[in-house]
Image (tube, grey):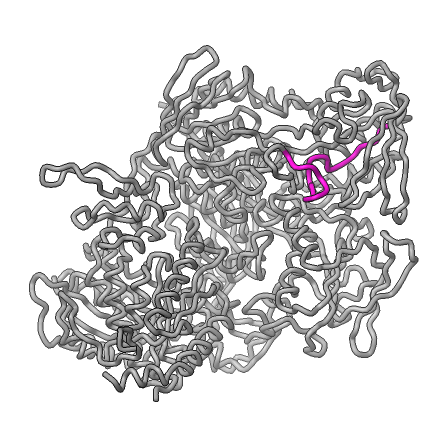
Amino acid sequence: MSAEIERKHADVLVVGAGIAGLQASLDLADQGYSVILVERMPSIGGVMISLSKVFPTLDCASCITTPRMASAAHHPNIDLFTLTEVQSIVPEGNGFAASLVKQPRFVEEDKCIGCRRCEAACSVYVPDEYDYGLGVRKAISIPFTNAIPQYPVLDEETCMLCGACAKACPTQCINFLQEPRRVEITVQAVIMATGFELTPLGAKAEYGGGKYANVLSPLQMERLLAPHGPYGSVLRPSDGKVPDSIAYVQCAGSRDLSLGVPYCSRVCCMYAIKQAMLLSGSLPVADITIYYMDIRAFGKGYEQFYQNAKAMGINFVKAKVARIREDDNHNLFLRIERQEAGTGPEEVQHDLVVLSLGMVPAWRPTPDGIIPLQADTDGFLRLPKTLLRPSWTSMEGVYAAGTATGPKDIVDAIADGGAAAMAAANYVERSRRQAHELAGAAR
Amino acid sequence: MQSEDDLKILIITTLISSYPGANTVGQARLQYSPGTYVIRVPDPVMFPEDFYIESLQKGIDGIIVMSSGSDCPYEGAYARLSSRIGRVYTRMKEIGISPSRLKLTTVCTVCKGAFLKEISAMQQAILADQPKSVAEGASR
Amino acid sequence: MSEPESVPAPDQPRVGVYVCHCGGNISDVVDTTAVADALAHHPDVAIARDYVFMCSDPGQNLIVDDIKAGKVDRVVVAACSPALHELTFRKALERAGLNPYLYEHVNIREQVSWVHKGDHERATRKAIRLTAAGVEKVSQQEPLESIAVNVVHHVAIIGGGVAGMSAAIALAGRGIGTTLIEASDRLGGRVAELPSVYPTGESGSEIVRELRDEVMAATLIEVRLKSRVTAMDGHVGKFRLRVEDTDGRAAEVSAGVIILATGHDHYAPVEGEMAYRASQSVVTLPEFLALLDQNGANAGSLVVNGRKIGSIAFIHCVGSRQIEGIHAPQPDGKINDYCSSVCCASTLHAIREVQGRWPDVAIYDLHKDIRAYGRAHEEMYLEASRGGALFFRFPDEEPPSVENANGRTTVKTKDILTWGEELDIPADLVVLATGMMPRDISEIIAMRKLPVGADRFLQEVHPKLRPVETAVNGVLLAGTCQGPMDIGEACTAAQTSAVKAAILLSKPIIELDPFVARVVEDLCDGCEQCIAECEYEGALTMADVERDGQTVRRARVNPALCAGCGACAAACPPRAINVAGWSLNQFEAMVDAIVAENVEALARAERRGRSFAPLAVGISGGPTR
């Protein structure tokens, strides 16, 4: 750890720079409040930036996310910290004090020009997290095409210290000796936008996720569908074959007590329908089947989207999938029980299967953790006034947005970001008024 | 006879969509012909029909309009643009310019493949139409 | 650095051209010195330099120093993508005291050196042409200033339900005053009707009371009950609303922002739909909730219209998820093809309520899908099921029917879950889970030409990214006027619209992008062709102007309403209208530079008049064809 400690003050600390955190930061900064935005990953943009297209508009996700990422990164009122972890947030005075640790990139950001020569020079290939392991990247690399900021990160674990990157760099910005750096900040209010992760691909062993190459997570499928995806088109990971028949298993990580995820993850129906539509566009002859319990197309324009998918010929089969097995050619066999026809269990073959995994919180508060917030039994942050104050957490001055407070789609996360920004702005204003009154009383 | 690289293809891109798309192609270091000139506009709907015709008459060999399509942030602009391009085609036919030298398409911020495909398709279209322009050049 | 052949004449633009090597990223492929040399010959170019890193401090200082020394009055940098450094260099211009828009950024990295690696010569020629095009563009560039609109620091909120009240409270907390305009004689809207709301079980009147108390306590909120908006004009920053109350008193409200929170209507089944009104045993869900309220907490049995109820059938999707050809169209000829999103959870909540108070009542639930999507909704579904409710699923295309004979009510349905069995379910009471309908606010819609979606709810500007803004800048949406929402969702939307309002009102003036249409009145001949092209209500109008003692009609732009798409520019025969910073003359000059055989040819061309004939002519129109 570097001995040097950086100290900063801002009106609001926003934890997490996914779409909810970005929106909350922008909605505060555009009002004139100063924001410290902290992201643990090397780029902002969260999960949304890795998606292919979004439902129900089928807008390209990158196209609509990057402008918002850029506005946040360039905003004069937003101080952005990437690759930075929050160590603690504690009440102090009428605000909060927080400790951050900025992890080293091993690249000096003020010198880097984003030319990627280091990346070209590097000879170490590692699986690309951004492509959810389907593609490869170099040990030093810019995380993905439209990452913001456009600086590479050197992966300490896999780097062989050969020095090729440093030689290739025209600005001598590679610094193998960078150390973590502590940043101590004080703020008036906090917004937690810590996001979600998917339930593990292998959580339901009977589905073979993580074991069978052609059983994919929905985010892997997003990457296959993205125009800048790892293969450039939708192919089976096992053999690079164009799949003729693709199945979606709904509720593969939700509404399932055995997984500890009894709730509905709310987005899986819609992302499965969206992916099915995109697949039928890129693989016009492929059969696409969605095995489901209920189709929950509840949002604005969603039902119409679902009906369009049905009209396009996507098969919706109300059935439970009991298990999946694989043959020697990595073809997949799903044992299903149709609920619409009493034909008993049967086995159907598909080339590729996507498990519609559910959402769980990416960060869960613990009593001795970074901030003593309360969580509900579902693991998401508890909202004591869920109807009228949907961004209030169990601590005054701390608000929450996006999937930190439950499964949510993009538009709801964006609306949430705005609401949390408003709540935080109200709190900052109240603190200012109180400080003003105190000063008046003391006089 | 012109070769691919002697061509001058004007690529009209949008600030929100296809211009960043062209940058994505560059970031991936994908290679294409230098006979391509990308200009950026808020929306191609601002160009009158004459702009296309006159550009082609001045020496541009082909024009690709890479619109934002459904991502277009302006009300009704895409519908207006596509009907205008339709009228440009009519005029091109009237004055003897092959309609294949103008293409309206949609390119997003990460549509690398589509960007390259449109360029090579336009090159082929121009080269296929060359006897005409060469004859025209000779008569001048 | 390359010395120019001739210094531009005093009235000519003096462009500084700066070509970046990007530490080899550009200069390994493009001969950056050759680019600077070629551009030095351009008549408008005063200085052309190349440098290893233009974005570095010394690089930026080259520009700043040249400007401060009076050598250049506009700037072209040929470097990486403008996404990375256009802003950097605009700021450098500002630091040097130059209007930041007298700047053009030419991309010779992502769009030249990185994509034409193998062909240095052609890549260099392309870079020269593109840079020359940049010089042409910036030479004709006018200094631009952002458009300042004075702001009325006040928000008008139309609709006093939970969404409207929620927005008003949030804005008051932020120090912004509001006028809350409510048509009825009390605040609270639809939520006040609900005896108990999911998932918390709070009563609607408690929720409304909490908000109403806050509204009444806030000095910054002015409430106008029994009032309607009868006229509305203006634009973001300064709208004027005429508000009339039922006693005929009228007032004018000035507001910088308008929030629409006009709410929804319940779907009303048409006469005979599911035997509604034909039988006293068929009620809608809102009616049923009111009945529950009338049956006291300690009532031993559920009594409706004097009859003890032993069984209830709930039918979902009445008036929602309608299918063309199967459901009768609404009076306007449309069907409600949308999902009303709240009815499933609301029905489950009502079932639990019945189960809790009258466990002996048999409950049947007939649905297409159970959309228990929200937090804690799935638990309600499980509890209802555990409490003994029987769930049946009917096919989308074959909704149940309700028959009423000899005082007995029977629901006939096909059940998918028992493989298509036809069932006759006798029920003492049938509850129709009716959805939401857009409220008729056509008068308000007409006042500002507000966008309405195919579902007839008000439409946001982008359903994903900008969920509460409308295409009319400064008019925002909150709650169910936009589409079905539950209370939490409506409050979230309200607070989001409040934040957008607060952003617009955060400064005494709103600074709008300068890239809007501008009319050169001397060129405008009043033909009005541009007007038909404009999609933005009020952005482009015809105004009377005095010209040589005569009154003539000229196009006029309201910059606060113009979006800057340029549709008008394409339609203007005399080119009197252009988007500032993106004029057609600029683009034509850029094309001229691109087709020029070489930059020297361009340099020889007359600057004004642009009469030179390009040497490389691929095709040409004309009668000889």
Say above or below: C457 vs C249. Answer: below
What residue lies at 14% left-to-right and 73% top-to-bottom? C605
| Residue C584 visible in the current orientation | yes
Residues in magenta, as a range = C312-330
Main SS, magenta residues: loop
What residue lies at 74% left-to-right and 32% top-to-bottom? C433
**Residue A102 position in % (x across, y down):** 50, 59
Front residue of this view, candidates C242 and A388: C242
Residue at the extreme left:
C10
Quarter of the image with the C terminus of chain A is: top left
Q: Does the magenta segment cover residue C324? A: yes
**Residue C357 position in % (x across, y down):** 84, 23
| Residue C91 visible in the current orientation | no
* Residue C424 position by quadrant: top right
Q: Is residue C279 left or right of residue C23?
A: right
**Residue A110 position in % (x across, y down):** 38, 65
Residue at the extreme top:
C247
Q: Is residue A366 left or right of residue B68?
A: right
Say above or below: C380 vs C397. Answer: above
Q: Does the magenta segment cover residue C159? A: no
**Residue A107 position in % (x across, y down):** 45, 69
